[in-house]
Amino acid sequence: MVKNRQAYARAEGRAAVAPAPRAWAAGLMLALLASAPDAMANRVSGAWGPNGAWPLIPIHMLLLPEGRVLSYGSNPDGTQTGRFWYDIWDPAAGSITAGHQLLPNTTQTDLFCSAQVVLPGSEDVLLLGGDNWVGNPPATNNRGNNDSLILRNQATPYLTPAADMNRRRWYATVTTLPNGEIYVQGGKDGTDRAEIRNAGGSFRLLAFDSSALTYWYPRNFVAPDGRVFGVSNQSMYYVDTSGVGTLTMAGNMAAASPSGVTTTDVMYDVGKILRTGGGSQSSTGTRDGKASAVLIDINGPTPVVTSTAAMPYRLHHHTGTVIADGRVVVTGGSRQPNQLVNVNYEALIWSPSTGQWTVGAKTPTTNDHARLYHSNALLLPDATILVGGGGAPGPVVNTNAQIYYPPYLYNKSGTFAVRPVITAAPDRLTWGETFDLQSNTPWKIKRVTLIKTGSVTHGFNMEARFMELPFTRSGSILKVQAPANANIATPGRYLLFVLDGQGVPSIAKVVSL
């Protein structure tokens, strides 16, 4: 693919001014929370905010280090392509429709169905692969490209080409490794070999043959022992990424377990994964989704799969989001893949302590609220969930988004609870250290939690990691224990929350590990 490298060589001479952290309390929390439908809200169901226009279909969403949101995947009219535009949303502007920078992608790389991750130790974002364009006039051929780009995250971001991968990849997964390197697996035209991007930006192929594994966004997670654990349909495997790499198959889940590419998979605790829904799609595309849900424990040498309560509905193309208290909220999906058949308009809330589901608030049952294929959900630092998209292709073209307010934001009367506040905490944490955290009400704090900032597409957050941090009190100071090592908390940015005795979370402090 031809790239405008000369123009971007000149652009690299710009001053690298990182954006300031967003003023969450003064922006989104005052405006969007005020517009939430309090009359329908409570501590069981939560509530939905209004649906608002988004500049494109947010097929991909990523939380930038300072709190803005990157999204891309279509043209403003909802046409499939990431070749021309991407959007940066600043929640501090105070609404879904305000605070957008719709920016041109002039690299000639189509980012549709690519992969993205914040580079550890950096403000910038790595984007890998995507769709391919050929011919004259150029048009997509629905095959992979081997491009990599860097989003320079400044006040006005811009994209610049970087080193090419060794394989073309469309629908690949990227995983941040404990040593800060980036593991890349799958993607159409690149299933035979995985590869690793090192800290210097170059790629090396691993030696094992991965062609038997799915190309479609492999569900990969770093296990507590440092290996990469993954699920391909219902087959489980481990990858040792040291040296030339080793692939070891680790058995199959039961036939009734969630399967296929329309599941959602969430690491809701250290070494523990919730996997729901999915099911193989028939040749006519009308096979019912599954309601089944399983837990995969990868804390030992081999994975242990157990059942948990089934979802209330049978779903394809839904998205699971781990929230500030460790529960998982499932949004979107439908009984038949990417069709307006038994659409899920409710927030489904799974509790790890009980293994049960609660049916949460329901958004209006209109097509522009149907979150099907290419919909998305992303946890924000204010502990709400940004939910949007659907389409390209599909029965809806949803260039819109809305906010879901989880139940923990409310008191018993259905109005917004008073939230604890983190008044001081370090910007950077070191594995194994004990750090000081200050709150406006330290005597009320019962929990401290840490969630990696999200990078979501196709029902899968490539960076989702939740952990509880033990702490003690020393006067008005909380002495908090950071994660023990980089296997448990891989390098990158995290949302640090405190929760009071009623389970009400603070606005997060964004910290770096």
Image: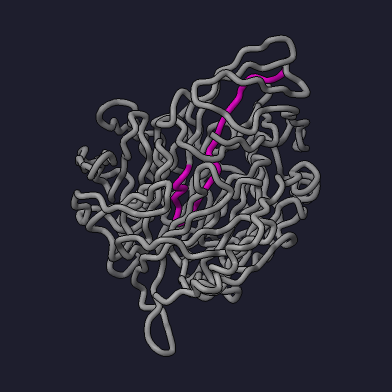
Q: Quadrant of residue 261?
A: bottom left
Task: Tell me if I can see residue 337 in this picture.
Answer: no
Q: Position of residue 240 (x, y in %)?
A: 26, 38
Is 228 placed above or below 394 here?
above
Q: Please indicate whether residue 493 sits to the left or right of residue 270 in the image.
A: right
Q: Is residue 302 left or right of residue 475?
A: left
Quarter location, residue 272: top left
Q: Looking at the image, can residue 310 be seen?
A: yes
For the N terminus, give its image quadrant: bottom left
Vertical position of residue 105 compared to residue 486: above or below: below
Bounds of the magenta segment: 444-463
Rendering quarter of residue 262: bottom left
Looking at the picture, tell me which residue is in the foreground, 103 or 153.
Answer: 153
Which of 194/411 is in front?
194
Q: Residue furthest top?
A: 475
Most common secondary structure along the magenta stretch: strand
The residue at 67%/22% (across/down) is 437
Q: Nearer the viewer, residue 19 or 503?
A: 19
Q: Position of residue 209 (x, y in %)?
A: 19, 52
The residue lying at 76 percent from left, 37 percent from top is 416
Q: Residue at x 55, y 43 (%)?
A: 453
Residue 279 on the magenta span: no
Give residue 474's position: percent from left, percent from top. 68, 10
Residue 461 shown in magenta: yes
Number of numbered markers? 0
Residue at the (42%, 59%) spot, across then down: 128
